[in-house]
Image (cartoon, rainbow, N blue to C red):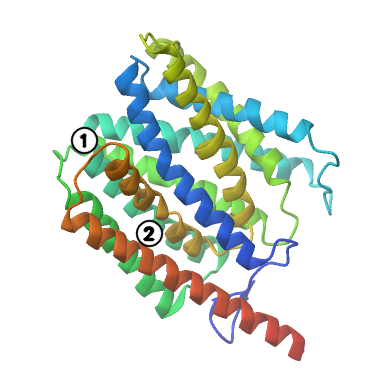
Amino acid sequence: MSNSSTGLAMGPSTALPLGRGLLYLAVAGVAWGTAGGAAALVFGASDLGPLALSFWRCAGGLVLLLGAMALRRRPAPAPVAEPRRRRLLRILGNGIGLMVFQSAYFAAVEATGLAVATVVTLGAGPVLIALGARLALGERIGWAGTAAVTGALAGLAVLCVGNGGGTVRPAGVVLALVSAAGYAAITLLTRWLGRDGRAADPSATTAWAFGVAAVLLLPFAGAEGLLPHTVEPARVAVLLVYVAAVPTALAYALYFAGAAVVRAATVSVIMLLEPVSAAVIAVSVLGERITAATAAGTSLLLLAVIGLAAAETRQAARSRRAAVAL
């Protein structure tokens, strides 16, 4: 529930400290940014399509995550048993949202180009999350949060549009907005379910999301071509394992854990570290040229992330002091 005296949302009571939640989200954002470079290498070395890659990403991430869960010496304790309807909502909501987010984004890239699809998807995401958090969760980000979100959107626009535009096609813009809505839905659902401190095991949450998304993607991936044809099978296999392990199994587990304890608007801005890390990969691995737009956009995004994370930390400290005073 929001604090009526300050107009800011109170942090939920959870076992995960806020600072660690912010760190988890930052690592997840950076890891997600490497997926695009790996995907570009896969596409260049094989005929695998985006839907098939998304399927293998989810299916491979599911296998790896289930293996890691099986190797645990002690299962993570659940503080409170999650009601069946709540658990079903979590499973289906995250799985469907993940499938929509990934597949609609790739379709938007195909329809209107990478620059426009990225700007619309990642630019609309924070706006939709902020609106949804205000309407559904009663969160208010205040002037500092508003300034940070504005700066992040400006940085994202400079980073993407300033490095070369694309033909704006209405169908592609609509698909990008659908992708942003899928991402926003995952973020808001995770935050809402974590407000009372009964967040589920993030590994189990991620595994279920991967499973649902993989099942939904399978027929589309099959129609596109499920198995890659390549003259470099070892290279493609290594890249697929990386995509499944780092920006998928690891990153989503960290994301679900962090998103349960950090305000939704803050999550949306921290996740903009994804295009920053993608820009670094593009320059260092793919040999793309550093431009003024890349430097300016990256700086604005990093400043926005730092500013909003600092505002989140200050609010949490004020909430703790108020609780102690009571």
Q: CA distance from mark 1 to mark 2?
A: 21 Å
Q: Quadrant of residue 191?
A: bottom right
Decide: few, some or many residues near mark 1? Use Cα within 10 Å; few <14, some 14-19, many ≥20: many
Residue 184 can be seen in this image: no
The amino acid marked with disc number 1 is Thr
Q: How many marks?
A: 2
Q: Which mark is residue 112?
A: 1
Q: Position of residue 36 (x, y in %)?
A: 37, 36
Using residue 313 as the reference point, say whether residue 81 is left or right of it. Answer: right
- Residue at 45%, 43% (x, y): give it: 32
Using residue 151 as the reference point, say whether residue 195 is left or right of it. Answer: right
Residue located beneath label 2 in the image: 127
Q: Which mark is residue 72?
A: none
- Residue at 50%, 59% (x, y): give it: 267
Q: Position of residue 92 (x, y in %)?
A: 61, 36
The amino acid marked with disc number 2 is Val
| Mark nearer the N terminus (1 vs 2) | 1
User: What secondary structure is marked by label 2?
Assistant: helix
Choose between 113 and 27: the one closer to the eye. Answer: 27
Choose between 262 and 248: the one closer to the eye. Answer: 248
Q: Position of residue 55 (x, y in %)?
A: 49, 23
- Residue at 31%, 43% (x, y): give it: 284
